[in-house]
Image (cartoon, rainbow, N blue to C red):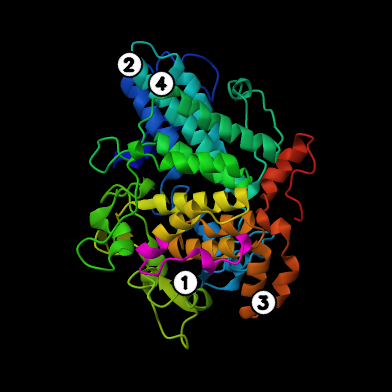
Amino acid sequence: MKRIYLYSIILLCIVFALSGCELESKEYGKVNSSLYPTTQRDMLDLVTSNAYGGFANSGYEGGFNVATGFHLLGDMATDFGLCAWGEGNWGQLNYANFQNKEGERNPRRSWGPYLPWISRMETTIDRIKNIEGVNENLKKRSIAELECGQAFMAFLLWDFYGEIVIADLETLKDPQNVKILPRKNSGETAAYIENKLRSVISANVLVKSYVKNDAEYGRFTEGLCHMLLLKLYMQNHQWDKAITEGRELMKAEYGYGLVTDTGTAGTAYANIFASANEGNRETIWATNGLKEYQSHIWYDHVIAWGGYKMTWDFFHTFETGDQRAGAEVITVPATSEIGVMPVKYDMKDRTGGDCYTDWIVFRYADAITLLAEAIVHQGGTVTPEALGLLNQVRTRAGLPAYGTGDFPGKDDFIDKLLWERAHELWYEGCRRQDLIRNNKYVEIMAEKCKRNGKTDFITTLGTKSHLFPLPDDAINEFTKGGFTGQQNPGY
């Protein structure tokens, strides 16, 4: 499974080549199903390519790449993210100064490359349904993986852009008839994500989770489906449903748990991201890395090129003794640099700036702290269960446990929990969602602007900043189709 994204690249080339060639008919843009796919190998290759290709972190490719991927865009646009490479390209992200205009690293760039993946997976499902002579259970698993991929990509786009376009199969099967579709509203998009994930779970064909030595490690799992549902319900304030999903992920059959010290006190947090410990029990899903096949380039961006930072203001919010602010970052003199170098992953499995350690997308510490938050939001009070979940993560970092007397009320607990999550999950794609969900994003980003002398940017902040703008070419297409008002509010 380590080579999953290499197969993706090869198979995408094959599929695109086929769809651009004249086969037996005179129609272009159509794969002749009598030629491809026809075998079980064809089916598996198509699924590997189309279900997983959009989620890679390989150089500058994939939805989680460290230059333009979803994690990077979201994290830069929070209180700890900062890029040293000038205001022209990065100012929109550094200070949530999102604008509907060009820029190399602008917040509009993820719409165009990743939206088509949802349709690509839909047509792949249709193609493989009719393949004969293959293992039916394997076919069902393949369809479930594609549906999980659709929900996963839709969630990422919904998180950043709100309403998205979801094409129906009838439209996709008639590419000669150009049909422009409007965006689904946010509720319809959320329902699409939920229904896809529920369908996958009810099919009962994905394993709960994989361990590192499994041949299929890296494929989608039922655990990933529940994690995506947890994230969806949290952002929609559906606390009761979120609680159900969080508790589901705590069940023994998934095998998840926090990584602990490995013989030396204080090594637990660093051990999560150690190359020798990739695929640990805390990892719910990660993108795979392997020498000569797929590598991420975080170290080039952080150390070799000196671009990505953790702001000094955020760094100073760590409590004394917090192991999460220890070996994972490289501090430099405040007088000469604008922040801390956020290394996080160890540098052992790499060649130059290329690192082959798996890039973690979701992990168990994220899940149980979201569960704690949902419990307190739902009940309006700090319960022993919620306190215990928070303390599991806190004490693992070498900090004293909180007691019930440390929280005057619900709001104080939520504030402390959000800081705990920020210190635990920096540069893991969570902070922006946390602040938006709790209506603190504008306030926090206004403070960041003030501290960095960007008071003129504060006037552009507002609830519109909860979403990124759509690119002009998308708006132009909507206009051609007779649909107006498709841009996100405020842009």
Contact, mark 2 vs mark 4 (Cβ under 8 Å): no
Q: Quadrant of residue 453?
A: bottom right
Task: Give the total number of marks visible in the rendering.
Answer: 4
470 horizontally vs 309: left or right:
right
Which of marks 4 and 2 precedes in the sequence?
Answer: 2
Q: Which residue lies most toward the left here? A: 263
Kind of residue at badge 2: Asn
- Res 104 seen here: no
Q: Amino acid at mark 4?
A: Lys
Q: Is residue 396 magenta?
A: yes
Q: Residue at x 66, y 78 (%)?
A: 450
Q: Which mark is residue 65?
A: none
The mark closer to the camera, 4 or 3, is 4
Q: Which residues are magenta?
A: 393-411
Against 249, is 261 above or below? below
Q: Which mark is residue 309?
A: 1
Please tell me whether residue 482 is drawn above or below residue 470 in the rendered image: above
Residue 140 disc label: 4
